[in-house]
Image (spheres, rainbow, N blue to C red):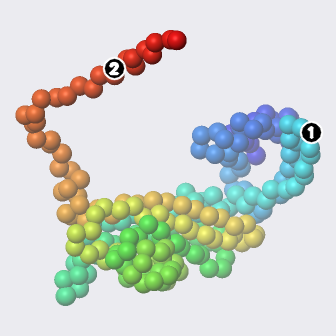
């Protein structure tokens, strides 16, 4: 196992300084191919004033495939039924890693504006509010966003919470953007300001008048 920051002490331990915890992309562990099951690591934290705290970190590398295999997108709008309703298909899937999970997988979609609805799941709070939507695995089939006419573009944040076979927990996030046809035209149209015929005014700071000394 290797880390992408810090110093390998060569004795099965590594030393991390404060700046190692904020490396771009986050601190990551790399395990050899085929690694699975939970790995517990003792952790010792020493503060700048000498205080020592101990604990442990449990990592389940088998869940890494789940993270890399998560797919989330909002597709182009389609007509859903004979009534003419238009919806944006919401695609949430896992390319790999499903066999590493046990129990229920919880999905949350946040950022869905008031007046926009999903064809599955339950919305927190008022049905016409702007609270997050809670989804289960069964809700993902034929899932669509129903967007009213005149709705502008908006971003939707997906959070997936799962539990691995060895008890490790995983929380994944993704983001996708929904752009209704009218909003797309509005966004792509350059805003051309009409030429002004008024003379431009220039602000000049006047020096403060000096008060006579007495």
* Residue 57 screen position, x and y as percent: 80, 56
Return the residue nearer the eye: 84 or 64.
84
Q: Is residue 78 visible?
A: no
* Residue 169 screen position, x and y as percent: 69, 67
Q: Is residue 13 above or below residue 141?
A: above
Q: Is residue 147 above or below residue 172?
A: below
Return the residue nearer the eye: 212 or 127.
212
Name the residue at 71% across, 42% down. 21
Q: Is residue 133 visible?
A: yes
Q: Is residue 27 above or below residue 39?
A: above
Q: Which residue is mark 1?
A: 50
Residue 25 quadrant: top right
- Which residue ends up furthest to the left in the rendered image? 197
Residue 152 quadrant: bottom left
- Which residue ends up furthest to the front in the rendered image? 214
Name the residue at 19% across, 88% down. 82
Name the residue at 72% across, 72% down. 165
Q: Earlier in the sequence, mark 2 or mark 1?
A: 1
Residue 203 - label? none
- Horizontal relation, residue 207 to residue 162: left or right: left
Q: Do labels 2 and 1 touch, CB within 8 Å?
A: no
Q: Which residue is mark 2?
A: 206
């Amino acid at each position: 196992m290797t880390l992408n920051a810090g110093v390998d002490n060569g004795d099965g331990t590594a030393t991390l300084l404060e700046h190692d915890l904020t490396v771009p992309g986050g601190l990551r562990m790399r395990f050899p191919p085929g690694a699975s099951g939970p790995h517990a690591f003792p952790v010792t934290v020493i503060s700048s004033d000498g205080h020592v705290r101990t604990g442990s970190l449990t990592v389940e590398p088998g869940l890494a495939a789940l993270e890399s295999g998560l797919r989330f997108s909002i597709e182009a709008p389609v007509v859903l039924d004979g009534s003419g309703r238009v919806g944006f298909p919401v695609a949430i899937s896992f390319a790999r890693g499903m066999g590493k999970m046990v129990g229920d997988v919880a999905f949350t979609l946040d950022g869905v504006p008031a007046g926009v609805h999903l064809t599955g799941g339950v919305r927190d709070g008022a049905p016409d509010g702007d609270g997050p939507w809670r989804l289960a695995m069964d809700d993902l089939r034929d899932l669509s966003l129903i967007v009213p006419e005149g709705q502008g573009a908006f971003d939707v944040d997906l959070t997936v919470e799962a539990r691995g076979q060895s008890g490790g927990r995983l929380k994944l996030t993704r983001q996708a953007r929904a752009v209704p046809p009218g909003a797309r035209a509005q966004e792509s149209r350059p805003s051309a300001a009409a030429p002004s015929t008024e003379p431009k005014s220039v602000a000049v700071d006047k020096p403060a008048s000096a008060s006579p000394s007495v």
